[in-house]
Amino acid sequence: MVSSFSFSVPTAVRFGWNVVDDIASALPEGTRRVALLRGSRGVTADRVRAALERVNVSRAEVICSGEPSLSSVSAAVDQLVDHGIEGVIAVGGGSVIDAGKAVAFCLGHGLTLNADFSQLPASRLAHPGPVPCIAVPSTAGTGAEVTANAVLDIPSQRAKISLRGRARCPAAAFVDPGLLRSAPASVLLSSGLDAVVQIIEAYTSCAATPFSDMFSAPNIARGLTALQAVMEGEPADPVWEDLAWVSLSSGVALANGGLGAAHGIASVLGGRYGAPHGALCGRLLVPVLRKNTEMAGPGTLTASRLRDCAVQCAAAFSDTSHKDPFSGLEAWQDRHALPRLREFGIRTEDFPALAEASAAASSSRKNAVPLTVVDFQDILQEAF
């Protein structure tokens, strides 16, 4: 854990059942027209439409299918630039919210993104423009509603790059647990695992702080238990509240304490193979925890934190081997058909290059313990 730190939570958050019905309250006074970005299913956008109609705010809708890319964001900006947009509301998972953050940034600053967008001046990325982004998460996953970056795919480079800066934090977020109910089981699994991985990696990160600990430590068991309940039956309202809270907390924790190797590897694999981020993180979690536990120095704070994770994983998912506290979680993932890396077209001959790129990823630099390129190859092999 770092000895000196700062923290930031610039997004104004509303959390609770039916808060989305009051979304118009977050718009600048006098707003008459907004952009509504939504996923391809668009079920959760109905409540937002109704809330806007009640206050006579018109909308231009943009459907975001798949993860955001340089071209999809540019196309959305071109579609909206002449429509007098005064705010952007992004309703969906992390991909839609990242798209919304990027679109609001471009509209507010009069920009068109190109392949060098990562080189935008820091001053431009530090100051919000006049077009706010309001985030409405409909899955429990990335915590993108409270983070300062938008991850965009650049297919020509086979990579994902973050548009990062304080200006990318949404002005407001409406986290309504009721919206999670409409997500398909496969989305609940992958996005819920992403939130759990973020909580665990923020807790064990070498850059964790007392502030990030407040959001990560209490939510490991809560996230594991809530995700299990959601996938196994008909959960009661408090379970959906827990899942939504864990997701939100994971965003605050990672933004202020960092992540780890699972996210570092996932960023590389997602860019090169187009594999879904949440599913990758979920499948990589157990191999990374095992490797970190193996490499952590005995008696260290890191070892203690990894032991906490092991105890909580074993409590939520019974140890099937009686020796490995993470085996129950891995068996549960297999039972729910979480894909292994081979199912995304990844090949073992690619491991050396993938491991080298993963070791250099920004998230990997904040991993619980330093890992070598060979360690990353071991993780890839175990998740294969």
Image (cartoon, rainbow, N blue to C red):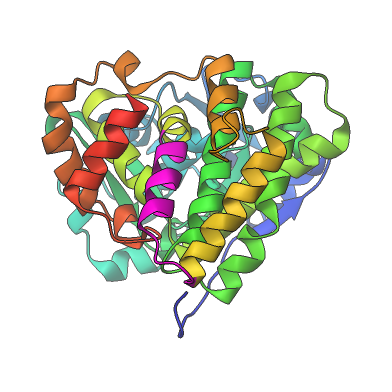
Residue 233, position in %: x, y? 79, 18
Q: Residue furthest front?
A: 322
Does the segment drawn in magenta span residue 329? no
Residue at image location 40% in from the left, 61% down from the top: 296
Residue 328, position in %: x, y? 60, 30
- On screen, residue 300 above or below 4: above
Start-end of magenta stretch: 284-300
Q: Count the marks: how many? A: 0
Task: Classify residue 349 by image quadrant.
Answer: top left
Query: Is 18 placed left or right of 10 in the picture?
Result: right
Is residue 41 something that shows in the picture? Answer: no
Quadrant for the C terminus, please.
top left
Does the segment drawn in magenta span residue 297? yes
Residue 201, position in %: x, y? 48, 53
Q: Residue furthest bottom?
A: 4
Query: Is 168 placed left or right of 359 in the picture?
Result: right
Task: Classify residue 33 by image quadrant.
Answer: top right
Residue 283, position in %: x, y? 44, 30
Residue at image location 50% in from the left, 71% down from the top: 301
Main SS class of the magenta portion in the image = helix
Q: Nearer the viewer, residue 84 or 217?
A: 217
Residue at image location 39% in from the left, 66% down from the top: 297
Query: Is 221 placed left or right of 101 in the picture?
Result: right
- On screen, residue 252 above or below 241: below
Q: Nearer the viewer, residue 152 or 143?
A: 143
Is residue 268 something that shows in the picture? Answer: yes
- On screen, residue 126 above or below 252: below
